[in-house]
């Protein structure tokens, strides 16, 4: 059983739901990025998504695009991200998922990347622009290094494609709450619950819902029907607003989500 699967099994045994924060690696700097990840683990993150900076992040809204650009301007590379993961792993056992586009991984060489990611303590990889046969092949290659391929599904995904995606997915399924790009929203789309229901017909993997979740109320809403909530742009926005000293503001923000976490886990 992978580290991610074990974490979700622990949540299920405890009748709890998961909290998955996303941060862009290297934003606002490598030392701060490590400190933020360690603080998120301390605050109760069940899995941490670590974004690999990319020059053309088409699936991301402006908040995460800016964070990626800031990291790139500081010279952050995929190797730096793996070094960050390795440092984090020396202090925490919270599962790490790399959130990346395909090009940075291919630029390193996929075999080399998979081995390096395993050595750095990466537990899963989510590749936004790898689909179908390509994704299935990538999933098999990652599995050889004990890394889960985390797959995306969206409200626009047909049942036929849901079935295909679920056959090669591992760890958990990331259900996008709405069509479009990342970014905090005032409410969780009603299509998210319908998507989770459709997806459960094809898999027994846990399902996490992300895109637009930014409040304790939205986290609690997602937990009614999904196994975990992903909070990304709202955390990245706090980092952007507090770049000189981001850890304490992140702690305050995430702690504001904790009451709903505690109630759901109780």
Image (cartoon, helix red, strand yellow):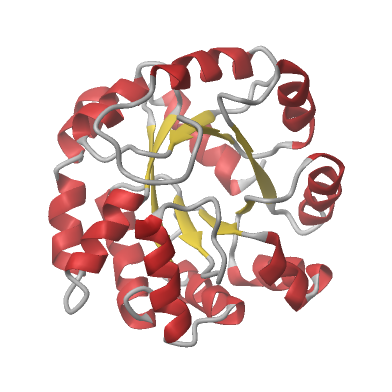
Residue 62 horizontal side relative to residue 142, left or right: left
Which quarter of the rendering shows the C terminus? top left
> What residue do we see at 32% from left, 76% from top?
28
Task: Indicate the position of residue 91 as horizontal and vertical percent values.
Answer: 40, 69
Task: Indicate the position of residue 218 as horizontal and vertical percent values.
Answer: 27, 29
Task: Indicate the position of residue 180 as horizontal and vertical percent values.
Answer: 49, 39
Examine the image and state in which quarter residue 220 appears.
top left
> What residue do we see at 35% from left, 48% from top?
45
Q: Is residue 154 visible?
A: yes
Examine the image and state in which quarter residue 27 appears.
bottom left
The residue lying toward the viewer, choosing from 63 and 132, is 63
Which quarter of the rendering shows the N terminus? top right
> What residue do we see at 26% from left, 40% from top?
214
Relative to 193, residue 255 above or below: below
Relative to 51, residue 171 above or below: above
Examine the image and state in which quarter residue 173 appears.
top right
Residue 5 horizontal side relative to residue 141, left or right: left
Task: Indicate the position of residue 217 as horizontal and vertical percent values.
Answer: 21, 27
Number of numbered discs visible in the structure rendering: 0
Relative to 50, residue 10 above or below: above
Q: Is residue 26 visible?
A: no
> What residue do we see at 46% from left, 18% from top?
191
């Amino acid at each position: 059983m992978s580290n991610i699967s074990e974490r979700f099994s622990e949540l299920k045994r405890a009748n709890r739901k998961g909290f998955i924060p996303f941060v862009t690696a290297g934003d606002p700097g490598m030392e701060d990025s490590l400190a933020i990840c360690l603080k998120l683990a301390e605050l109760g993150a069940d899995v941490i998504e670590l974004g690999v900076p990319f020059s053309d992040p088409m699936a991301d809204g402006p908040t995460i695009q800016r964070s990626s650009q800031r990291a790139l301007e500081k010279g952050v590379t995929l190797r730096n991200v793996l070094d960050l993961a390795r440092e984090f792993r020396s202090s925490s056992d919270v599962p790490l998922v790399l959130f990346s586009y395909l090009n940075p991984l291919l630029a390193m060489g996929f075999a080399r990347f998979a081995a390096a990611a395993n050595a750095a303590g990466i537990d899963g990889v989510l590749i936004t622009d790898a689909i179908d046969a390509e994704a299935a092949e990538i999933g098999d290659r990652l599995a050889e290094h004990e890394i889960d391929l985390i797959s995306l599904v969206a409200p626009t995904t047909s049942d036929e494609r849901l079935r295909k995606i679920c056959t090669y997915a591992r760890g958990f399924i990331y259900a996008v709450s709405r069509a479009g790009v990342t970014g905090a929203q005032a409410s969780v789309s009603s299509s998210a619950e319908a998507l989770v229901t459709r997806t459960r017909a094809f898999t027994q993997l846990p399902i996490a819902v992300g895109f637009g979740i930014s409040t304790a109320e939205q986290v609690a809403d997602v937990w009614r029907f999904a196994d975990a909530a992903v909070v990304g742009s709202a955390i990245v926005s706090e980092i952007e607003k507090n770049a000189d000293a981001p850890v304490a503001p992140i702690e305050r923000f995430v702690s504001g989500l904790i009451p709903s976490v505690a109630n759901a886990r109780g």
